[in-house]
Image (cartoon, rainbow, N blue to C red):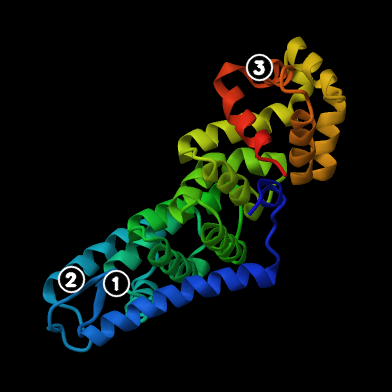
Amino acid sequence: MAITETIKFNADIQGALSGFNQIESKANALSGKLNRIGGTAVGAGAAIAAPITAGLGLAVKEALAFEEATADLNKVINASDQVVKSFSGNILKLSRDIPIAATGLQQIAAAGAQMGIPQQQLLRFTEITAKAGVAFDITAAQAGESIGKISNIMGVGIDEIENLLGAVNHLSNNMAAKAPEIVNTLQRIGGTAKTFGLVGEEAAALGAAFIALGKPPEVAATGINALLTKMQTATGQSKGFREALGAIGLSAEELERSVREKGSQSIVDFLKRIQQLDEAQRPKILLELFGSEYQDDISLVTTNLN
């Protein structure tokens, strides 16, 4: 996927659902494979011993761990015994369909609750996050914490999270960017992206674009944060920055207005202006705009624009 197309990427509902359906397919396929091997799946590639606790299909050790995880969850949601019992029952049912231990699912739920997921949406959050964790090959704890943080930072609900994870899956299938790397980057740029006006899918696409150019998540994120921050605060930047904008035919006021009115398209337009500079002038302008710390990162992006 060309970088220009990637930055402009904004998954529609059908496309995002298609991406999440692929996540579900991966999770279901692994669950079916484990069940055919024999035993109840408790993780991506493991099965617990023969059931001992009647009716639950949980080994004693796993049952004790689940009880402890349930207690930890209740410390966060502070619900009645009846609510906790009902929720735990649903978690146990879910663990039969998703190749993650019931304990791991409770950990995801606890992480979601800590990040502000409403109690009535917690089961669905757990299911969506668990399936993504399996598809993205990350642990239950990592999935719960990272996806919960993204939801909290970007202020998105359950439906938006499902669409976003579908978009991440789509991007990782079509670019040289792994899903865990995109998720990692989203945690680091979510706040800036939200302030800029990007939706989750656009932020994911921007992160994937930088990663696909060989940047690790932490480097990709610092470059993206610098780019977005400088664009939306152009009038407050240095004299040298404003003069460099003039060299690409923009005033600081025009750039900020473009951000407000065009959102993600303003990024493409801005980078294209830099790309059109002659090769001798471009490094000097990039240095004035982004400093020596981010000059190379933005230069690499502009070079790869189509």
Q: Mark 3 to mark 2: distance in Å?
A: 57 Å
Residue 205, x across and y down, in percent: 62, 50
Residue 97, x across and y down, in percent: 37, 81
Instruction: Say which of 72 and 174 sits in front.
Output: 174
Residue 16, x across and y down, in percent: 62, 67
Q: Is the C-beta separation of discs 1 and 3 under 8 Å?
A: no
Query: For mark 1, what is the residue?
Result: 102
Q: Is the C-beta separation of discs 1 and 2 under 8 Å?
A: yes
The amino acid pointed to by label 1 is Ala
The amino acid pointed to by label 2 is Glu
Residue 136 placement: quadrant: bottom left
Q: Is disc 2 placed on a helix, strand or loop? A: helix
Q: Is disc 1 placed on a helix, strand or loop? A: helix
Q: Is disc 3 placed on a helix, strand or loop? A: helix
Crowdedness of circle 3 by 10 Å Cα count: few (<14), some, many (20+)?
some
**Residue 256 position (above or below residue 115):** above
Residue 189 in view: yes
Q: Mark 1 to mark 3: distance in Å?
A: 52 Å
Query: For mark 2, what is the residue?
Result: 62
Q: Which residue is drawn at 44% across and 52% down?
A: 180
Residue 287 numbered mark, or none? 3
